[in-house]
Image: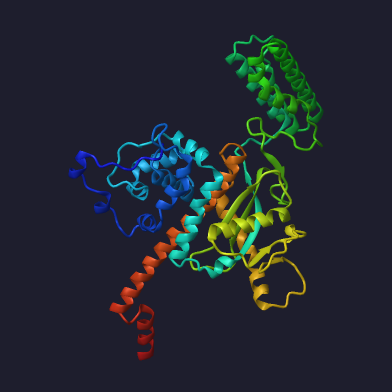
Amino acid sequence: MRPKLPEARPDDLFRSSLESILDPRHELLKLAGLIDWTRFDDAFGTHYHDRKGRRGSPTRLMTGLHLLKHMKGLSDEETCATWLENPYFQAFCGETFFQHRLPIDRSSMTRWRQRIGAEDLEALLAETIAVAVKTEAVSERQLERITVDTTVQTKAVAHPTDSHLILRSIEWLNRLAKRHGIKLRQSFLRLTTRARREVARLLHGRGHKQGLRWLRSMRTWLGRLTRDIRRKIAGDPALEAAFATVLERAERILGQQPDDKDKLYAFHAPEVECIGKGKARTRYEFGCKTSIATTNERCKGGQFVLGAMALPGNPYDGHSLAGQIDQVARLTGTSVARAYVDRGYRGHRIERDNLDITISHTRGITSPTIRREMRRRSAIEPVIGHLKEDGHLERNHLTGPEGDAINAILTAAGHNMRLLAAWIRLLFVWILCRLYNVGNPTTPYSATADRRVAA
């Protein structure tokens, strides 16, 4: 059913409200007053049934937890633990009185993300942009000129080596066989664990041939194990269905060669792709390509993210530009007039009215405005760095292609929340300075200057 609304308890009359004990000038309380929370009730209400099932958790609580999680760069467990300790977190999520017990389980955050989906979670990013416009951290004119670039949001997987993947395959097969009561001729767990250790030791030194010999033995053991399981589940449709996915991935790992395309890089995450961005320190990254769009002009509140979308399949950058521009227009409600991209977008073939796409290092640009804005294109690079360092774009723990899309959207919303919090703090300091100058017209600098003149 639709989410429940907060209810007043009889003992609340004798309790102090959070509003009476917290500092109203805190940035989280200011942000809570600026965000239109009813927007999320309208956007997410279609995912609930009117009469069937138990009532869902309050929408403001769930959206607030996710905004705080990606604003502070926390995990689900850390977010829930901090919510219990921090009264500002509770006030931001709509609580009137301090709560000593979390009203939801940590796993409810995972199920809520899966229920809402990446498409509707764009409302969180759109609301952060609306708050930025409302507080004049960014103007509507600045939303018309954007910078677009792609990066890789790496998955939380181990570095894919052949020995590691074979060991994981044997572990998964043994775990599933034990669960269904299948007695194996040999598990190969002890042998494979030792072999993987020997491969790592020998390949690190000079024993390359000996390491490859151990690797061939590991492949032989995996093949014997898969054939043994197939013989023992033959003729049982229930067991064949239970082992279908694991056996398919194990045989895929067993047969893939170094030069193959579309290889399996993580046993539990087949959507992981190998992407090379030409970095000197990181030759290959394993995850999903992600497109990021930011404001081009230097805004008062900082460089806001206007769009973020996962690009499964590692498409050519130019083929993703049209979708990214459409997303920015959808989230901001403003048509994009100019887009600045790097040379990876050459050949995009996008021709629209009132849209100018400029590629870096293009010759013959005579307009000083476009040349100045083109020099601002590289300002998106530190934004991507903050998304990875301060957010969750560097190590994505969400499952599947849908998890990649959700993580990109929420990480962008968390970045905008950090900028808005800093902008509100700056506004408060500016107001204090103005009040100080009204009461003391002579600033410390001018007083020093007057003393120097008098001397």
**Vertical placement of 36 versus 13: above or below?**
below
Query: In the figure, residue 259 lies in which quadrant?
Result: top right
Pick out the residue farthest to the left.
14
**Vertical placement of 289 versus 109: above or below?**
below
Q: Position of residue 356 (x, y in %)?
A: 68, 68
Pick out the residue farthest to the front.
51
Residue 75 in sight from this viewpoint: no
Q: Position of residue 32 (x, y in %)?
A: 37, 54
Quadrant of the drawing holding the N terminus: top left
Q: Position of residue 11 (x, y in %)?
A: 20, 39
Residue occupying the point 24% across, 53% down? 20
Q: Position of residue 46 (x, y in %)?
A: 47, 43
In this rendering, position of residue 424 left or right of residue 363 = left
Task: Choose between 434 and 328: the one closer to the eye.
Answer: 328
Quadrant of the drawing holding the C terminus: bottom left
Query: In the figure, residue 422 lies in which quadrant?
Result: bottom left
Residue 82 in sight from this viewpoint: yes
In this rendering, position of residue 161 left or right of residue 427 = right
In this rendering, position of residue 419 left or right of residue 434 = right
Colouring convention used in this rendered image of the protein: rainbow
**Vertical placement of 29 versus 44: above or below?**
below
Pick out the residue farthest to the bottom.
454
Residue occupying the point 49% across, 68% down? 300
Residue occupying the point 35% across, 74% down? 434
State the count of labels: 0
